[in-house]
Amino acid sequence: MAAIARYGMRMVPDAEQIVRQCRQRGQLVQGPHIAAFEEEFARFLGQGHVRAVSLEYGRMALLDILKSMKFPPGSEIIVPALTFWVVPEITRVAGLKPVFADIDPATFTLSPAAMERAITPNTRAVLPTHLYGLSCDLDPILALARRHDLKVIEDCAHSLGATYRGQMVGTFGDASFFSFQAFKPLNTFGGGMAWMRDAELARRVGEYADAEPWPSEERVKSILRAGWWQRTFIRPTVFTYSGFPIWWAASWLNTKPDRFLWEKVQRLDPLPAHYGGRFSNVQAALGRAGLARLPEFIERTRRHARMLDALLGDIPGVSVPRTPPDRTHVYYQYCAYVPDHEELVRSCIRRGVDVAPMHVDVCTRMELFGGHGPEAKGAEKAATAVQVPVYESLADHEIERIGRRVRTQVLRQTRRPRAAGGSEPGH
């Protein structure tokens, strides 16, 4: 059977036609779709002001927001200890200091108690990350922010469409940012969106976005080509003969080719040249089509998550993702705790299912940030979770196969006799 990759890409059925129409009209770079996409995105969220930002990186929306808030240099920004390393690094690019606070390992999101401990007289903002598609526990975070006069900037890169107490994430704080990278909930092959509650803040963010140069038509074509190649590469029939043999061999050699999937961890000040460039018209056209289908994409992914819950939820030692009753989950990733995560990853890959280790970072242990951050037991525990493929482009029978493969391998682990004096699996 064809191997199943860990990541999927959301593509609207008429994507090629949308790109062709923009090209024929000479509107790959500039055109009317940008303003229309911003209007429709704001309507989807239900309130506030939005601005499409950057040809390639949603993180530029965060940078523009931080610069527009005009914090004193060196101000402290509270960031979850578990997040993509680029988020705290961007705060440093803005001339600010990231301060890490631990997460709740049950939800993978910022712990309000840890946030409170991290607040000092120099704290100016908090950056709660709605990780893997689930909202943070926002009420206590917002209450702490009000008490200490802090700005709240929501990281919604994984969570477009998720809700907290019936309200869209990204609309609770002072600002938020979204990513449209190829594997994100809304795919425009790069770029992002900034949301602002205040019109004046939105105006300043818009000035930064407008200061970026328009990309060349060839550069826009190149990101589209890269996206199409990525999509081809991860299709099961292609992945079986391309990436999968590398992952299969690595499982026996105890190496981790994952690092080649992600950009190099490095200081970003000064910003690399390719970070520049405005969001293009063809990306906005794809974004409009994807936004119209987003509820359908989310519901299909949720159905897949329910199937995995049914297959995995009754296994001793397995903890499937739990959604608190006041929130909804969009399952950018389906993250579960298992008795022996490293062995499960190896055994599933060898049988054609690319179950992945966690791909965000425990920033408190990264050399980039000193490597000796505050204790973060929740983030360290979260690093033992595995990501099980759940994306909407998989067929139901493929989800069934994934769930049964994981179930079989975990049950084999738990039934395996322990060596004398050995420890329990996963401890």
Image (cartoon, helix red, strand yellow):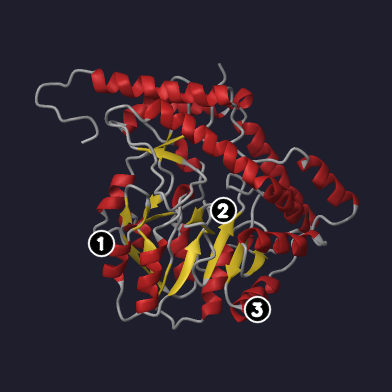
**Residue 203 badge:** 3
Amino acid residing under circle 2:
Leu
**Residue 63 badge:** none
| Residue farthest along the left direction in this orientation | 421
User: For the point 33% across and 33% down, which residue is it?
Assistant: 341
Please say if 60 is above or below 314. below
Q: Quadrant of residue 336?
A: top left
85 vs 104, left or right, is right
Q: Where is residue 395 shown, x and y percent of the image?
A: 60, 26
Is the C terminus in the top left, top right, bottom left or bottom right quadrant? top left
**Residue 160 badge:** 2
Label 3: few (<14), some (14–19) or many (≥20) C-alpha neighbours in 10 Å:
some
Q: Are marks 3 and 2 in contact (CB under 8 Å)?
A: no
Residue 53 in sight here:
no
**Residue 374 badge:** 1
Select label 3 or label 1 by which is in front: 3
The local secondary structure at tag 1 comes to: loop
